[in-house]
Amino acid sequence: MWRYEALLPIEQPNGVARAAGRTPLIRSHALDDAAGCRVYVKDETENPTGSYKDRGSAVAVPHAIEAGTDVIGTISYGNMAISTAAHATSLDRACIVLVPDEISPARLELIAQYEPTIVQVSGDYGALYSDGVALSESLPISILVSDAPARISGYKTAVFEIYESLAPDTPDAIVLPTSSGGFASGVWRGLRDLETLGLLAEFPRLYLVQTVTADPITQAFETGATEPTALSPDETGETIAHSIGNPDPPSGTRALAAVRETNGAVVSVTDQEIRTAQRQFAVDGGFCVEPAAATPLAGLTRLSERDAIAPDESAVVVPTGTGFKELGADDASVSTERTSRAALPELLDSLLAAR
Ligand SMILES: *Cc1c(COP(=O)(O)O)cnc(C)c1O
């Protein structure tokens, strides 16, 4: 991503930041049927910690260090925590990660591999987000949350890469999962940068996808509101798409504006639709994505059913995070064939004959 250094607020840093971005854009014919249009996959699972968050951490962590911070912090128990901890340690800085009290051991292990200080915080974890700003002001720590401006400028490099890979073609739509709206803000910023530079004649339609269990941005889109209304705890539910459950999105207003200015839409999908899309990503496309990252495909299925996108149009779907972090975390049952070494030729023979 550092080929776009001139459009970023810092010069190329050292450390794992150099491995962030420059992910492949793949024309995936096998996903066209599921999506109802021509699908390109911008494979953000290929970032160093397996999610697009690395584009933001690669800029925001060195940016905070340049500003004089010795200790980096974040409020997350998911990809944001993993990414921030990796980038801080690779620049030899301490990192403090604030996680909820009831975090699972599997999640703790993923964060702990980079050896940040992990603090389990009881009380209203959602409300901790607004404390982060105040804590960064009163203590010698930079708490980098989803709408830190330097993070958002890192995210915009995903757009530059999409346009550079496709040129001279351009996509009709870009489809992203959305929670806090940080990634959507970065994509919107990237599109406007390209327009300002005279490199973009027409915006693609920006489609954002949420889960029905926490979809304040969808609700605002549908009611015509310019700002999302925060959902109370009894208005949200459990979802397999745990990376996109923010009930009070800090960048929601910007995300909504981007959708409206590009003639896009915000849609919500159910866990069942997400599971189907996750399976389609794997079985049809060969991609291992986490549930949240499968939502763009589920969203496209919905959009094509209501003719918001035509079969001959192109959409860039962005699987935002790898599914490999999730494996082993539940007791999924898998069916296999079993045999001995001696009986293997016979078994293979019958399996091949049955094809
Ligand atoms: C963080 C995250 C999102 C949502 O991004 P926001 O900036 O919060 O909207 C989507 N998918 C994955 C895998 C994530 O980790």
Image (tube, rainbow, N blue to C red):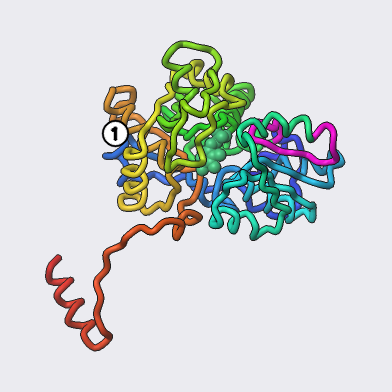
Q: Secondary structure at mark 1?
A: loop
Is residue 348 found left or right of 71 in the rendered image?
A: left
Q: Is residue 195 visible?
A: yes
Residue farthest to the front, as pictured: 123
In percent of the image, x 40 and y 33: which residue is there? 315
Q: Position of residue 23 (x, y in %)?
A: 54, 48
Q: Is residue 170 visible?
A: no
Decide: is 329 above or below 162.
below
- Read off the residue under disc 1: 36
Ligand 1 rendered quadrant: top right
| Residue 146 painted magenta | yes
Decide: is 186 above or below 140.
above
Q: Quadrant of residue 327?
A: bottom left
Quarter of the image for the N terminus: give it.
Answer: top right
Does the beta carbon of the residue at mark 1 sit less than 8 Å from ligand 1? no
Q: Position of residue 244 (x, y in %)?
A: 50, 36
Quarter of the image for the C terminus: give it.
Answer: bottom left
Is residue 215 found left or right of 59 in the rendered image?
A: left
In percent of the image, x 46 and y 26: which residue is there? 235
In percent of the image, x 76 and y 45: which residue is there? 72
Q: Position of residue 276 (x, y in %)?
A: 31, 43
Q: Amino acid at mark 1?
A: Gly
Is disc 1 surrounded by few (<14), some (14 to 19) or many (20+) residues within 10 Å?
many
The residue nearer to you, when weighing 249 against 53, is 249
In percent of the image, x 55 and y 15: which residue is there? 227
| Residue 286 painted magenta | no
Give the magenta range.
136-150
The residue nearer to you, when weighing 220 against 86, is 220
Q: Quadrant of residue 308?
A: top left
